[in-house]
Image (tube, grey):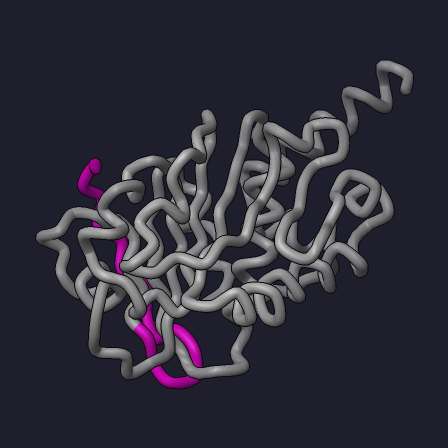
Amino acid sequence: MNSKIRDKLKKKLLKWRADPVLFAQEAFGFEATDQQAAVMRSFARPGAKVAVASGHGVGKSSLMAILAMWHTLLFKDAKAAATAASATQLRDVLMAEVRKWVGQAHPWIRAQLECTTMRMSVAGNESTQFLTARTARAERPDALQGLHATHMAFFIDEAFGAGVRFFKRFLHAGRVFQTTFTGNSQGFFLEGHRNLALQFFNDICEAAPDWVAKLMVNNKEE
């Protein structure tokens, strides 16, 4: 690769790192809605904690997959963990979305990302830049331990299945994106979503059944 092409690529990657909405559009052809774009840009803030509740079939898993690839590909020493209450949910929903979007990606992106059933990694940096999918429940407190990197991200799907004490162990380690179904009224999601006194979340999405009704930003430092 000559210096001009390398410099052009570097500029493009820096633009993508600064704006996940642009990354989604140019790398995958993913056209975000206004609400999705607000969530994506909120997640891009260092240390962001984003909570989203919505109805089924409105794009939460696609959004989570795109953001997982944005984080893993565009930051050095970047690890991400995706978790849900069951391996089936991870394999057939979230990781299926990852594989789908990798298959539809720009050829350069496809060449960088390697996917298996429960893992995605960056070619050539498989041990330092990856997404791993692991089930996490209150009775398995070790499921997400042992992951350390300069840039960490956690993607928690249908987060109501575990308690606050379980997640408190790692939530300050990096970015967090958690989702649940509208109407959930139990567990960690509810407390993280509604109780700012916990100071876990500097980005809170309050939801309407169809998607996100509004985005509120709490500018307090963690």
Q: Nearer the viewer, residue 51 or 147?
A: 147
Task: For the C terminus, give its image quadrant.
Answer: top left
The image shows residue 28 at horizontal and vertical percentages of 73, 56
Q: At x 37% / y 78%, what residue is drawn?
A: 181
The answer to whether residue 63 is magenta is: no
- Image-based side of 67 in relation to 199, left or right: right
The image shows residue 104 at horizontal and vertical percentages of 80, 60
The image shows residue 85 at horizontal and vertical percentages of 41, 67
Can see residue 34? no
The answer to whether residue 218 is magenta is: yes
In the image, the segment drawn in magenta is: 207-222
- Residue furthest top in the image: 3
Can see residue 184? yes
- Image-based side of 25 in relation to 213, left or right: right
Q: At x 43% / y 48%, what residue is drawn?
A: 154
The image shows residue 192 at horizontal and vertical percentages of 22, 59
Q: Nearer the viewer, residue 68 or 126?
A: 126
Q: Quadrant of residue 220?
A: top left
- Residue furthest right in the image: 2
Q: Against 80, is 86 above or below?
A: below
- Image-based side of 161 in relation to 15, left or right: left
- Residue furthest left in the image: 197
Q: Nearer the viewer, residue 134 or 82?
A: 134
Q: At x 9% / y 53%, what residue is drawn?
A: 197
Task: For the N terminus, give its image quadrant.
Answer: top right
Q: Quadrant of residue 101?
A: bottom right
Q: At x 32% / y 49%, what residue is drawn?
A: 49
